[in-house]
């Protein structure tokens, strides 16, 4: 371990940007019915954006809580990160979808709008036939993140500090088991649909990030500045075994390996993100707006290439960052970012 390695100097902003871009590709291929080869599919899912977001979130949010465990500040900081951007996106969605001929002046909106603003995301019946059946399909992970934020402090508040690692390892085992149960038994029933959109099958991914942060693995000589080796090994193993091992048995080992790869990439040439992005963290805006862009394209039956969807999403992500997200993030207390 090298105690002089700076935790805050890393490439997580860049990794989240790449993760958001992967999600755009994934959703564009699916909703715009773009053909893709089996090899292309394997490559596309090497770094699944949602898993990347959950791992990084567990890593950074747990670090943020440990550096400022005032529960009021913790929830204030989380709210400042999620809600302003979400609210702007919801209201812009209403405006854009209204322009395409849909009226929001109905009884369903009275219940739907407050739910969206607190992060209970769903598509109301009057929008179920709009676009691809969701007013903004990218927002489904917002409730999951909010659930993660609510669950995380419980361990810190209830468990003795010297027992926290054992506690999080125990939780990881429990929720890995629950995830496997879900994958083995899930159906299209309402109960399993509700489970899918709960923390239950996904929380183990977040916990991997928490555990990696607590173990301070980023300081290890096997991690720091070893991103190229982890990347090559991760890609090679995935392409060799992705279609040869039972997907459920493969899932956990693959996610752990992904987490190691992400951590090493984050601390390899750790100033790269700052040099390229100039501390602009536009990934959240890209993620929440690309779903709106795609659903309008599908609704209007426009023929739009993927690179145009990406460009539009990047533009909206940047505008969201500079006009909404950044001003509110600057109000956060004791940020773990090197600069904002």
Image (cartoon, rainbow, N blue to C red):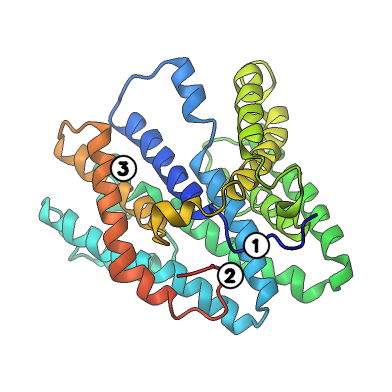
- Spatial CA distance of label 2 from label 3 is 38 Å
Of badges 2 and 3, the one in the foreground is 2
Residue 167, numbered circle? none
Q: Locate residue 156 relative to residue 75 in the image: left or right.
A: right
> Which secondary structure, mark 3?
loop
x 60%, y 64%: residue:
8
Q: Which comes sooner in the sequence, label 2 or label 1?
A: 1
45 up-or-down from 323: above or below? above
**Mark 3: few/some/many CA within 10 Å (<14, 14-19, 20+):** some
Label 2's element? loop
Q: Earlier in the sequence, mark 2 or mark 3?
A: 3
- Residue that lies at the very extreme toward the right in this rendered image: 162
Residue 130 visible, this orientation = no
Distance of label 1 from label 3 (alpha carbons): 42 Å
Determine whether label 2 and label 1 are within 8 Å by CB.
yes
Residue drawn at x 67%, y 75% as measured from the top left: 67
> Which labelled disc corresponds to residue 336?
2
Residue 93 % position (x, y): 24, 58
SS assignment at label 1 = loop
Q: Quadrant of residue 72?
A: bottom right
Can the viewer see residue 261?
Answer: yes
Return the residue nearer the eye: 305 or 215.
215
Q: Locate residue 132: give its quadrant.
A: top left
* Percent x, y of residue 223: 71, 45
Q: Residue at x 40, y 55 (%)?
A: 277
Q: Position of residue 260 (x, y in %)?
A: 68, 42
Residue on which the image places disc 3:
133
As drawn, the label of residue 7 is 1
């Amino acid at each position: 371990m090298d105690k002089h390695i700076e935790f805050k100097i890393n490439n997580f902003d860049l990794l989240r940007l790449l993760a958001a871009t992967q999600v755009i590709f994934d959703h564009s291929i699916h909703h715009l019915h773009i053909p893709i080869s089996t090899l292309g599919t394997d490559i596309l899912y090497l770094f699944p954006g949602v898993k990347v977001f959950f791992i990084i979130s567990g890593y950074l949010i747990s670090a943020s809580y440990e550096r400022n465990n005032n529960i009021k500040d913790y929830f204030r900081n989380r709210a400042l990160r999620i809600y302003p951007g979400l609210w702007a996106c919801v209201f812009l969605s209403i405006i854009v979808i209204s322009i395409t001929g849909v009226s929001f002046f109905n009884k369903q909106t009275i219940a739907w709008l407050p739910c969206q603003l607190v992060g209970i995301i769903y598509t109301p019946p009057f929008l179920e036939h709009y676009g691809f059946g969701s007013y903004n399909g990218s927002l489904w992970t917002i409730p999951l993140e909010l659930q993660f934020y609510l669950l995380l402090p419980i361990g810190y508040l209830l468990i003795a500090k010297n027992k926290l690692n054992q506690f999080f390892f125990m939780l990881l085992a429990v929720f890995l088991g629950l995830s496997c149960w879900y994958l083995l038994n899930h159906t299209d029933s309402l109960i399993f649909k509700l489970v899918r959109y709960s923390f239950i099958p996904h929380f183990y991914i977040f916990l991997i990030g928490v555990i990696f942060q607590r173990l301070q693995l980023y300081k290890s000589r096997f991690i720091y500045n070893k991103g190229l080796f982890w990347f090559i090994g991760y890609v090679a193993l995935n392409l060799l075994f992705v279609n040869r091992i039972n997907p459920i048995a493969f899932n956990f080992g693959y996610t752990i390996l992904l987490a190691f790869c992400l951590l090493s990439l984050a601390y390899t040439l750790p100033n790269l993100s700052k040099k390229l992005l100039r501390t602009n963290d536009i990934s959240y805006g890209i993620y929440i707006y690309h779903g709106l862009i795609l659903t309008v394209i599908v609704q209007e039956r426009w023929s739009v290439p993927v690179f145009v969807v990406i460009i539009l999403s990047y533009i909206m992500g940047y505008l969201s960052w500079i006009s909404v997200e950044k001003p509110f993030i600057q109000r956060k207390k004791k940020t773990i970012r090197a600069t904002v």
